[in-house]
Image (spheres, coloured by chain):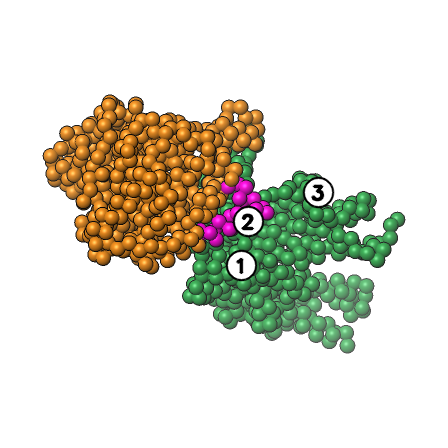
Chain colours: A orange, B green
């Protein structure tokens, strides 16, 4: 009954009284009950609370009262955003019992827009990973092929969307964690400009890179969600002043194509992807040419250094951000500790997973006396050069297009023994975070195994409205985004 | 007996001043001391996952204002850094501080020494940071953490090693307290931990034509000015003795930390070697840099006002007060301003100074307040000073009236009349009493005239008799004059 509806259609149906929010939530909860045991997208489901929220929205509509733009819509959020309902685990044993006393800004915004939060989704521990296999709590599989990964770190949100177990989801993107799982799961994933959405209440991984964004079934839904979430928040000093960057009406001109669109490309980057991905990207570019777009070849001379710079900056920040999980104040405390040093060392040794430990050690090393200049400072310089590469590209074109991930979804366990191979899964997405600019992943095809492929559209800071219009141009002439995996509950 | 050793004391200070802002450094918690443990906290100062700091602008302005008073260069661009170390009282296991771009640097403080000279001590830097909480170990077989204080704004001031005696260190601390209280940026109560001083002490010893430097020792746990002075004195002697016994001198990494034991009046070794701390400083990504434009700079500067030492010097020059009197009057701003109001209302400066520093401050101390808050209008106190000057009341009566005024702020003249404290300076009336007393006390007069052994005592007795007969109202100065004249007449 509700299958195939996107978020805006569902919202309109609820608002118009064709269906109640309760029915939508019940339908969603039933689908989760049937399908999620085989997918593992959700870490927690708030059935009672969600029904309560749905009843409130239904009552408002019945009384003819105004409702928010997400009225009655079942939404999932990644488990690194604080929500007073249930737990906020970050996919980690160290926070497996952590109940936050406050809501994240993004959660407040959703609730204020009358959304219904159905549950919280699995993720790589502390958002460190590209397959969700680093979750310390649960395994999540790709709904298109359950022997494969959903991508990561927002793999739970992407899988929940692809399996139709929610109508929109929130993820976070530090090096590709929204766009890459969106690509691998055949949905739309938007990483907004750094500072566009407040990080207050988002459990930090790499503070200067982290950004919240929506995972949706189409570009239009992404525009709807971004409109709800964007804006200044005085509790986050890095959230952007709206006098500098006003929040536009993302839905307003969404359907209007960009005239004389200029698309920057780096041909050798596209050619580096595996054949199916490369061909899908090239086919997408051909379609844009048919819309009247021109392709502009640009250079990104520092692109190759982005993974190295990222793994210094992100891990340095993470080593400091994760210092607070020490067993003293909240979260997991080792029962084997005899003094406070052991409370620290044993709680952390037992609470953190291998990848988190690896990154904490990397970051600690990079910040250590005598190494700071050679690693951290140098990485900051590289970051500036990468930013400059983007500025130069955007001087010549409206946007930059490239694949999201070098491959389609890989097999579970395929890369878990080789961290470097796993890191390369983010080769196309990481530089965007270093530059702080927005990027969106939209479905642009399937490989021979019928695994989804994503196209990445990147623009200058605060050009989300334009990026979404460019994405919408493609979507309006294709149906990749409408395709869904066949699932047995 | 060893020969007298020639040595020089070298002391620098690391100072932490708690700023009296409305809220904490990076969150909205009201900054109130006390309260049950962990009651004055929020997700931000608890370091909860997902919480983010927001800079307290008032704290920044307080810090800049203090740095200006310390003649520092004010940075127009600063940033925040994380200083990483693990300790249970530090919720995030890093402290937000300032590392390579402090908000101010390279200043100096001028300290009026007790001998009247001025000592200049260099300020290396002053920067802002957040305070940690407090660990307690006295509750049982476990330790507890109270985070009420966590996130309180702290101004850290580092001085150059320019102080050369224990008393200079104490006077430096007192002068800094006077400055920050003038600026109103801190209550600066040492007992309550609003100000913490950590002296770094060593000696330069000249022996056999060579200079030996002793190992630097840092002293902690000082909660009074007396403790500062005593502890430095103690450390100077301890280091001298140690050097003479062992020849131990400064080496890389042999800095020690001592705690002051106030009960036994000794320093106690806390840490033998300077731990090889690696704080892994890096720029705080959750905060944006602070840029200070000219307008903001000038706006803060305009709040500086006259600083205590300037005021003290002006009081000496403008009112002809002694340096000591001026320093007592300017010890706190409210008293100094009250003094000036009284003088402006027409009182003599020296007389006003005496009234305030002798009677006024005694009363203020009893009431745990300052002279200006005793409820006496400057006009009424000026009138009291004038009455004393004109001889209408005695010094004793002035003190009595002062005290009454603090209870009812009435006109001093009315109090004097009501309590019969007005002095009689009418020469004719007094002369009549003198004559009567001389006639009634022939023996005493004889003793004086014959210049006997008890002549002085006898004259005092006659004085007392006259005052008594006048019911205490005769002006002693006038009585003494007339009495001396009459006795001289009798003698000749």
Q: Which residue in the protein does label 3 denote?
A: B266
Name the residue nearer the viewer: A288 or A78. A288
Whether residue A241 appears in this view of the structure is no
Left or right: A48 as drawn, with respect to A127: left
- SS at badge 3: strand
- SS at badge 2: helix
Do tag 1 and tag 2 residues touch (Cβ < 8 Å)?
A: no
Where residue A92 appears, as percent x and y from the top left, is 42, 31
Could you tell me how many numbered marks the image carries?
3
Vertically, is A317 above or below A52?
A: below
Mark 2, other Cα within 10 Å: few <14 / some 14–19 / many ≥20: few
Residue at image coords 35%, 45%: A271
In the rendered image, the quadrant that contains the N terminus of chain A is top left
Badge nearest the viewer, 1 or 2: 2
Q: Which residues are magenta?
A: A363-384
Q: Which residue in the protein does label 1 denote?
A: B104
Majority SS type along the magenta span: helix
Q: Which residue in the protein does label 2 denote?
A: A374
In the rendered image, the quadrant that contains the C terminus of chain A is top left
Left or right: A12 as drawn, with respect to A293: left
Residue at image coords 28%, 42%: A280
Q: Is A369 contained in the magenta span? A: yes
Q: Is A8 contained in the magenta span? A: no
Name the residue nearer the viewer: B332 or A262. A262
Marks 1 and 2: same chain?
A: no
Where residue A392 appears, as percent x and y from the top left, is 37, 58
Where residue A175 appears, as percent x and y from the top left, is 39, 42
């Amino acid at each position: 009954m509700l299958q195939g509806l996107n978020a805006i259609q569902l919202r309109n149906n609820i608002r118009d009284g064709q269906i109640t929010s309760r029915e939508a939530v019940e339908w969603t909860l039933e689908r989760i009950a049937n399908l999620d045991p085989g997918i593992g997208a959700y870490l927690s489901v708030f059935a009672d609370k969600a029904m309560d929220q749905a009843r409130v929205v239904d009552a408002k509509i019945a009384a003819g009262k105004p409702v928010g733009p997400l009225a009655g819509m079942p939404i999932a959020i990644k488990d690194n955003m604080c929500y007073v309902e249930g737990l906020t685990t970050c996919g980690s044993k160290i926070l497996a019992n952590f109940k936050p006393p406050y809501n994240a800004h993004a959660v407040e915004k959703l609730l204020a827009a009358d959304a219904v939060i159905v549950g919280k989704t699995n993720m790589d521990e502390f958002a460190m990973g590209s397959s969700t296999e680093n979750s310390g709590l649960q395994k999540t599989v790709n709904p298109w092929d359950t022997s494969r990964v959903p991508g990561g770190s927002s793999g739970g949100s992407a899988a929940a969307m692809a399996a139709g177990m929610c109508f929109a989801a929130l993820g976070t993107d530090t090096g590709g964690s929204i766009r890459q799982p969106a690509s691998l799961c055949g949905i739309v994933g938007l990483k907004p400009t750094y500072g566009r959405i407040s990080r207050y209440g988002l459990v930090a991984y790499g503070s200067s890179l982290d950004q919240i964004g929506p995972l949706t079934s189409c570009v239009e839904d992404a525009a709807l969600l971004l409109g709800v979430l964007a804006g200044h928040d005085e509790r986050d000093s890095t959230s952007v002043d709206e006098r500098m960057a006003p929040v536009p009406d993302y839905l307003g001109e969404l359907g209007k194509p960009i005239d004389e669109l200029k698309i920057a490309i780096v041909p050798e980057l596209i050619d580096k992807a595996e054949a199916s991905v490369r061909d899908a990207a090239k086919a997408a570019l051909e379609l844009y040419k048919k819309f009247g777009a021109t392709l502009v070849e640009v250079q990104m001379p520092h692109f190759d250094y982005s993974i190295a710079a990222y793994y210094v900056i992100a891990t340095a920040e993470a080593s400091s951000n994760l210092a607070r999980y020490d067993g003293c104040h909240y979260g997991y405390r080792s029962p084997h500790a005899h003094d406070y040093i052991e409370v620290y060392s044993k709680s952390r040794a037992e609470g953190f997973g291998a990848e988190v430990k690896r990154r904490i050690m990397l970051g600690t090393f990079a910040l250590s006396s005598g190494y700071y200049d050679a690693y951290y400072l140098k990485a900051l310089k590289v970051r500036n050069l990468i930013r400059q590469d983007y500025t130069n590209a955007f001087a010549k074109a409206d946007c930059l297009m490239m694949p999201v991930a070098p491959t389609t979804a890989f097999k579970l366990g395929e890369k878990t023994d080789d961290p470097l191979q796993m890191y390369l899964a983010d080769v196309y997405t990481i530089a965007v975070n270093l530059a702080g600019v927005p990027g969106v992943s939209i479905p642009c095809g399937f490989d021979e195994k019928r695994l989804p492929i994503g196209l990445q559209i990147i623009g200058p800071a605060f050009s989300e409205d334009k990026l979404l219009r460019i994405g919408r141009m493609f979507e309006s002439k294709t149906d990749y985004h409408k395709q869904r995996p066949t699932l047995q509950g | 007996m060893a020969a007298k050793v020639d040595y020089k004391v070298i002391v620098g200070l690391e100072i932490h001043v708690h700023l009296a802002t409305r809220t904490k450094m990076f969150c909205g918690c009201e900054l109130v001391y006390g309260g049950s443990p962990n009651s004055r906290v929020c997700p931000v100062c608890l370091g909860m996952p997902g919480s983010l700091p927001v800079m307290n602008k008032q704290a920044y302005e307080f810090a800049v204002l203090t740095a200006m008073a310390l003649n520092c260069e004010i940075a127009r661009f600063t940033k925040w850094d994380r200083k990483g170390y693990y300790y249970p009282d530090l919720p995030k296991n890093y402290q937000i501080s300032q590392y390579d771009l402090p908000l101010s640097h390279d200043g100096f403080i001028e300290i009026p020494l007790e001998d009247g000279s001025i000592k200049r001590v260099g300020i290396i830097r002053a920067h802002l940071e957040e305070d940690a909480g407090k660990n307690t170990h006295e509750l049982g077989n476990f330790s507890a953490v109270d985070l009420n204080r966590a996130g309180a704004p702290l101004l850290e001031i580092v001085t150059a090693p320019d102080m050369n005696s224990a008393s200079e260190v104490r006077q430096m601390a007192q002068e800094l307290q006077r400055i920050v209280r003038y600026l109103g940026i801190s209550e600066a109560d040492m007992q309550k931990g609003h100000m913490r001083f950590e002296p770094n002490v060593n000696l330069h010893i000249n022996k056999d034509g060579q200079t030996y430097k002793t190992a630097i020792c840092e002293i902690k746990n000082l909660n009074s000015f007396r403790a500062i002075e005593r502890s430095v004195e103690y450390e100077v002697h301890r280091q001298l003795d140690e050097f003479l016994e062992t020849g131990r001198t400064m080496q890389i990494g042999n800095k020690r930390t001592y705690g002051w034991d106030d009960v036994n009046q000794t320093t106690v070794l806390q840490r033998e070697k300077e731990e090889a701390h690696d704080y892994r400083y890096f720029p705080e990504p959750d905060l944006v840099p602070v840029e200070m434009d000219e307008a903001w700079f000038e706006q803060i500067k305009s709040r500086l006002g006259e600083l205590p030492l300037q005021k003290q010097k002006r009081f000496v020059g403008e009112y002809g007060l002694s340096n000591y009197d001026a320093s007592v009057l300017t010890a706190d701003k409210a008293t100094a301003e009250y003094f000036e109001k009284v003088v402006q209302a027409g009182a003599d400066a020296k007389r006003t100074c005496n009234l305030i520093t002798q009677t006024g401050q005694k009363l203020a101390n009893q009431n745990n307040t300052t002279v200006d808050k005793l409820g006496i209008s400057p006009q009424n106190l000026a009138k009291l000073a004038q009455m004393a000057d004109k001889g209408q009341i005695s010094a004793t009566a002035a003190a009595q009236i002062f005290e009454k005024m603090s209870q009812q702020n009435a006109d001093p003249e009315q109090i004097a009349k009501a309590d019969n404290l007005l002095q009689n300076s009418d020469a004719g009336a007094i002369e009549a009493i003198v004559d009567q007393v001389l006639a009634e006390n022939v023996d005493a007069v004889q003793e004086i005239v014959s210049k006997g052994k008890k002549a002085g005592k006898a004259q005092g007795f006659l004085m007392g008799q006259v005052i008594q007969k006048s019911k205490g109202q005769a002006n002693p100065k006038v009585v003494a004059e007339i009495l001396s004249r009459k006795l001289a007449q009798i003698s000749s």
